[in-house]
């Protein structure tokens, strides 16, 4: 099914993104099929045909695809809801909260949860390290170089949901894997994480670097909480 292939095909599209030196943001059907066959031999010819047929049915061009749109479509489990999933949602979070981002509140909540199981002093030290790293200029530069400049396919200084969905999904999946649940993130969870950091600065549905950096900080807190038991601070004596 489409969702079963989404993560694998998404990784292939991400690989193409790194090879897209011209930054066109477009991949041809021939190129994508070739990549799928070489990098994911477990996906058969019939699977590929069904994938493109479903994409065409949902209105995506299948000769030359804008890969950010294609990845967003892959993350949508219900074709009928595709338009809604791409549209900014009102999450009930006020503009100031969106501007600040959710990461600091999430970090405090994660610390409280961890203190129920682990020594509070060690928990505090762990999350203080996390907070210091996320506040640093080095981290902001890391986000810009490693993530923002990569997902900003058209180099206009703005990132939409279609550009960021795959990265959000991967981060939430990483947190789930570290936590041992392995539950894939839902489209709603991916969309909610984006919308919670979507301010009016660039217009609804678009993020500049500042909003995107806060989104990345939030996702890193989610991963840090899940990874806490693996930290040297919590190694068994």
Image: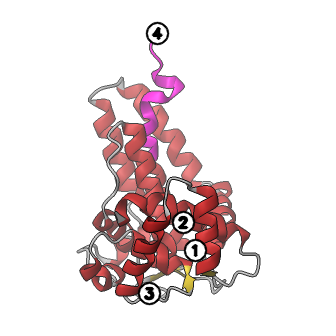
Kindly indicate the quadrant of the structure image that contains residue 89.
bottom left
The structure residue drawn at horizontal position 48% and vertical position 51%, both measured from the top left corner, is 220
Query: Of label 4 and label 2, which has the lower sequence position?
Result: 2
Q: What residue would you read off at disc 3?
A: 60
**Label annotation for residue 213:** 2
Q: Nearer the viewer, residue 225 or 108?
A: 225
Secondary element at tag 2: helix
- 73 in relation to 230, above or below: below
- Mark 2 Cα within 10 Å, few/some/many (few <14, many 20+)? many
- 66 in relation to 140, above or below: below
Q: Give the CA distance from mark 1 to mark 3.
A: 28 Å
Relative to 148, is 193 on the left or the right? left
Query: Of label 2 and label 3, which has the lower sequence position?
Result: 3
Relative to 148, is 2 on the left or the right? left
**Label annotation for residue 237:** 4
Q: Give the CA distance from mark 1 to mark 4.
A: 43 Å
Q: Give the CA distance from mark 4 to mark 3.
A: 56 Å
Residue 157, position as x, y percentages in the image: 62, 83
The structure residue drawn at horizontal position 51% and vertical position 63%, both measured from the top left corner, is 9
Residue closest to the far top: 237
* 1 vs 3, front mark: 3
Q: Number of callouts in the render?
A: 4
Q: Nearer the viewer, residue 54 or 104?
A: 54
Q: Are marks 2 and 1 in contact (CB under 8 Å)?
A: yes
Q: Are marks 4 and 3 in contact (CB under 8 Å)?
A: no
Secondary element at tag 3: loop
- Mark 3 Cα within 10 Å, few/some/many (few <14, many 20+)? some
Image: magenta residue range: 223-236
**Label annotation for residue 209:** 1
Q: Give the CA distance from mark 4 to mark 2.
A: 37 Å
């Amino acid at each position: 099914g489409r969702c079963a292939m989404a993560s694998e095909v998404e990784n292939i599209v991400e690989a193409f993104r790194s090879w897209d030196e011209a930054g066109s943001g477009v991949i041809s059907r021939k190129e994508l099929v070739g990549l799928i066959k070489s990098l994911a031999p477990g996906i058969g010819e019939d699977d590929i045909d069904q994938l493109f047929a479903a994409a065409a049915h949902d209105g995506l061009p299948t000769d030359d695809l804008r890969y950010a749109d294609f990845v967003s479509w892959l993350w949508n489990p219900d074709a009928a809801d595709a338009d809604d999933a791409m549209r900014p949602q009102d999450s009930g979070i006020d503009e100031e909260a969106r501007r600040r981002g959710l990461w600091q509140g999430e970090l405090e909540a994660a610390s409280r949860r961890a203190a129920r199981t682990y020594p509070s002093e060690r928990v505090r030290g762990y999350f203080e390290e996390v907070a210091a790293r996320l506040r640093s200029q080095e981290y902001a530069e890391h986000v810009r170089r490693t993530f923002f400049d990569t997902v900003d396919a058209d180099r206009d200084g703005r990132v939409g949901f279609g550009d960021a969905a795959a990265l959000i999904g991967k981060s939430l999946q990483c947190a789930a894997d570290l936590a041992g649940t392995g539950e894939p993130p839902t489209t709603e969870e991916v969309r909610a994480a984006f919308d919670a950091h979507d301010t009016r600065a660039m217009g609804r549905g678009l993020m500049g670097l500042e909003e995107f950096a806060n989104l990345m900080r939030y996702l890193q807190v989610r991963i840090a909480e899940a990874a806490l038991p693996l930290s040297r601070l919590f190694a068994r004596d």
